[in-house]
Amino acid sequence: MRGVLLVLACASCDGVFGLNAVPLPAADAPPMADAPPMIDGAPMIDAPAGGSLKLVVPTLPAIYVDDTPTISVAIHGPINASVTVNAAASVGMVAPASGVRMLDGNGLGTFDVTYTAPSAASPESLSFTGSAGSLSDLETAPFDVLPLTSVGLDASTALAQTSTVGQALGLRVTINSAVTVRKVGFYTTTAGAHVKVGVYNLMNLTPYQLQVAGGPQTVVAGRNVVPVASTQLPAGQYWIVVTLDAATMLEYRNGNNELYGASNYPYASGMPAVWGATWNDVANSSFEFFMLVEP
């Protein structure tokens, strides 16, 4: 005897049922919601009309004196909205201080600023204010600007002499315990040239192996600080080497126990991995060269 499949239809029912059948969703049932888009680990705000505006300031890493990091602030808000963002720092500086950003089809945008830390350690707080029509948001980011310690000669003097193009100049310094170098600096009374810097260990009291290099960077009158890759240096003696592409009035001092050195070396060649050029030492006369290291 053959089996018979019994199918029942009901005008008042949402679906069709039969033996071993599974109920079907109603034709007008709302679709299952997708998981909300995420940004920075949080649900993205999508407010097409009269919704929300939110600025997301990243957690800032350690910032040291004279640092110039770029900070990217995420903007979440109405789709295709025009958002005005204002930025300020309590001690340092931010640039640009304001700007207008058009959010995309997902209600997202970014506002990037360059923060310039002060030259002295200090508590700091950045503030970012966003506005779009009646919507607004204010976010603050407090942090500490950490100190760095100078190694070498870090003071302006009344003495200056012109550097020779195609010549590398140096100052020999002593480090009594391991440090992490972050910047190399010098003083000048003239601006406009470009500078490259390097730190070398010693062999027979002359520069030997490059430990870290920085630049090129445009020279300003006064105190110049060139960022270098964060590099640990063990205790010992080192040469701070500076080379410029144009004659520059570098500040120096007499009667100092540190050695000043010079070598004929072209600026375009940068800082070689191993110093091979002739190096001449001059005692009791020193340029104002220094390293900034983590304490």
Image (cartoon, rainbow, N blue to C red):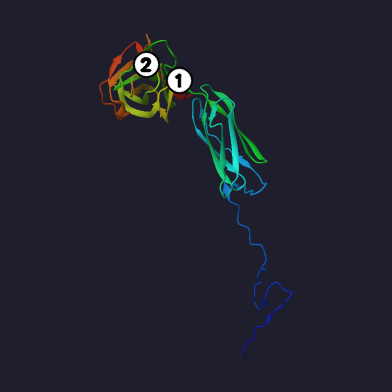
Dot 1 or dot 2, earlier in sequence: 1
| Closer to the eye: label 1 or 2 | 2
Q: CA distance from mark 1 to mark 2?
A: 22 Å
Q: Which residue is mark 2?
A: 249
106 lies left or right of 295: right
Asked if one can make out residue 178 in the rendered structure from this viewpoint, the answer is no
Report the residue at 54% width, 41% height from top. 110
Q: Residue furthest top?
A: 255
Q: Secondary structure at mark 1?
A: strand
Q: Position of residue 227 (x, y in %)?
A: 43, 28
The amino acid beneath tag 2 is Met
In the image, taking residue 198 as reference, residue 14 lies left or right, namely right
Taking the image as shown, residue 125 lies to the left or right of residue 287, namely right
Compared to 71, does 275 lie above or below? above
**Which amino acid lies under the numbered mark 1 shown in the image of this protein?**
Ser
> Label 2 neighbourhood size at 10 Å, few (<14), some (14-19), many (20+)?
some
Q: Which residue is mark 1?
A: 150
Of the pair 254 and 244, the residue shown nearer to us: 244
Residue 102 appears anywhere in the view: yes
